[in-house]
Amino acid sequence: MKKDTTILFNTISFNLLIVFIIYYCLVSFKLSEVFDFIQDFFLNFSIGIIGFYASAYGCGLVLSKMNRIRIYHGVLASFLVLFIGTLAGFYSRFYTGRLAIEHPI
């Protein structure tokens, strides 16, 4: 892996840890509620996280091929990673919700 991809991966991992800690504080420090929430939306979270890392890999490859990387290239790449990962999680929820409406168990 290139240096740019590694930096993006580390940033995503650090941000996911921060999100976990913030949600842990919001639910009054009850770890069981955090895991229940993750269990309820496991498919959405896993597809969203895979989308984050896949888009970070792609953006890292593009950044590594550039001759001169300016600071705004890295910022734009980070926002692109955030946008693609969010869309992946959203569309997984839309798709699974659509399946539940069309084909109830």
Image (cartoon, rainbow, N blue to C red):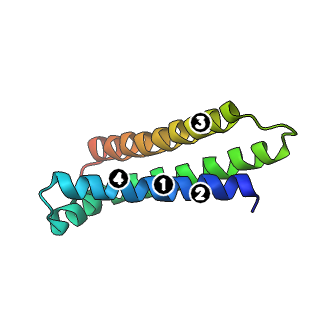
Do residues under tags 4 and 2 come within 8 Å of each other at their CB atoms?
A: no
Closer to us: mark 2 or mark 1? Answer: 2
- The type of residue carrying mark 3 is Leu
Residue occupied by mark 2: 9
Name the N-terminal-most of marks 3 and 4. Answer: 4
- Please, is residue 49 above or below residue 1 in the view? above
Q: Position of residue 75 (x, y in %)?
A: 61, 35
Mark 1 to mark 3 CA distance (whole Å):
14 Å
Q: Which residue position is annotated with label 4?
A: 19
> What is the distance, in whole Å, between disc 2 and disc 1 at their CAs?
11 Å
Q: Secondary structure at mark 3?
A: helix
The residue where tag 3 is placed is 80
Q: Position of residue 91 (x, y in %)?
A: 44, 40
In 3D space, how far apart are the residues under numbered discs 4 and 2 (Cα atoms)? 15 Å
Measured along the vertical axis of the image, is residue 94 above or below residue 37?
Answer: above
C-alpha separation, residue under disc 2 versus residue under disc 3: 14 Å
